Amino acid sequence: QQQVKQSPQSLIVQKGGISIINCAYENTAFDYFPWYQQFPGKGPALLIAIRPDVSEKKEGRFTISFNKSAKQFSLHIMDSQPGDSATYFCAASRRDSSYKLIFGSGTRLLVRP
Amino acid sequence: NAGVMQNPRHLVRRRGQEARLRCSPMKGHSHVYWYRQLPEEGLKFMVYLQKENIIDESGMPKERFSAEFPKEGPSILRIQQVVRGDSAAYFCASSPYPTGGNNSPLHFGNGTRLTVT
């Protein structure tokens, strides 16, 4: 019930293409869904986050789509660039569980020039 | 405004020794979370602390692991009698409020990579 399942494990996209990463959760009590970007040797950095009362949120080239009934959410990276090559993690947290983040297993994205 | 500072960046310990990992949160942040990341895996929650209090330690092994966040000074994650399975990257994160509350993002440090030989 506490799991967040992420796919794919790895993704290769051509420069200018769209990268799509998917996550699914079981616990309907989750009320905060962030995406983090991590470069090798660095800590994760928050990219974009959404709450379940919104179906989509866009910030620049990054968009979260949220489907509450299917308990799924996804990250879309438009016009993908080589500098976007990193590992991406989805996560979820609950107000009544110390807000601790439950992370997905990560997607390693490679954007080819 | 300096980010979350963790030290040391790399730590090598022999089996049975103690490991002490330090985390200085961002200025004004009183909420600290510790996470562990095994190679090629996601981050796993360990413990959540506010100044001088442990709020949630449900992700921390009952034995050998302890954490503190004193009134003055950094948060410390201590691992006693380390074993090879403790080898991982340990990340600290801080926020001014509990994660997700008041749109409060979690700021991560660059981690301490612990290697147990």
Image (cartoon, rainbow, N blue to C red):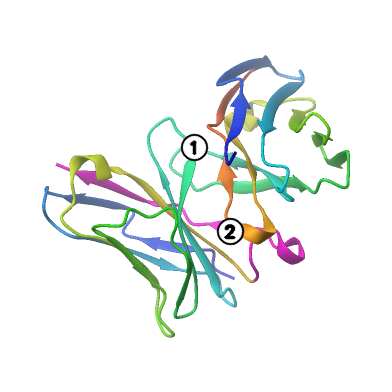
Chain designation of label 2 = B
Q: Are marks 1 and 2 in contact (CB under 8 Å)?
A: no
Give above or below for A44 relative to A20.
below
Which of pointers 1 and 2 indicates the residue nearer the eye? 1
Q: Earlier in the sequence, mark 1 or mark 2?
A: 1
Left-right relation of A79 to A102: right
Query: At x 26% / y 45%, what residue is drawn?
Result: B86
User: In this figure, which residue is indicated by the disc labeled 1?
Assistant: B42
Query: At x 60% / y 48%, what residue is drawn?
Result: A45
Towards the viewer: A61 or B61: B61
Distance from disc 1 to disc 2, alpha carbons, whole Å, reads 16 Å
Q: Position of residue A71 (x, y in %)?
A: 75, 33
Towards the viewer: B41 or A53: A53
Which range of residues does the magenta coloring cover? Answer: B97-117
- Confirm whether the magenta stretch covers residue B101: yes
User: In this figure, which residue is indicated by the disc labeled 2?
Assistant: B107
User: Quick one: quadrant of the N terminus of chain A?
Assistant: top right
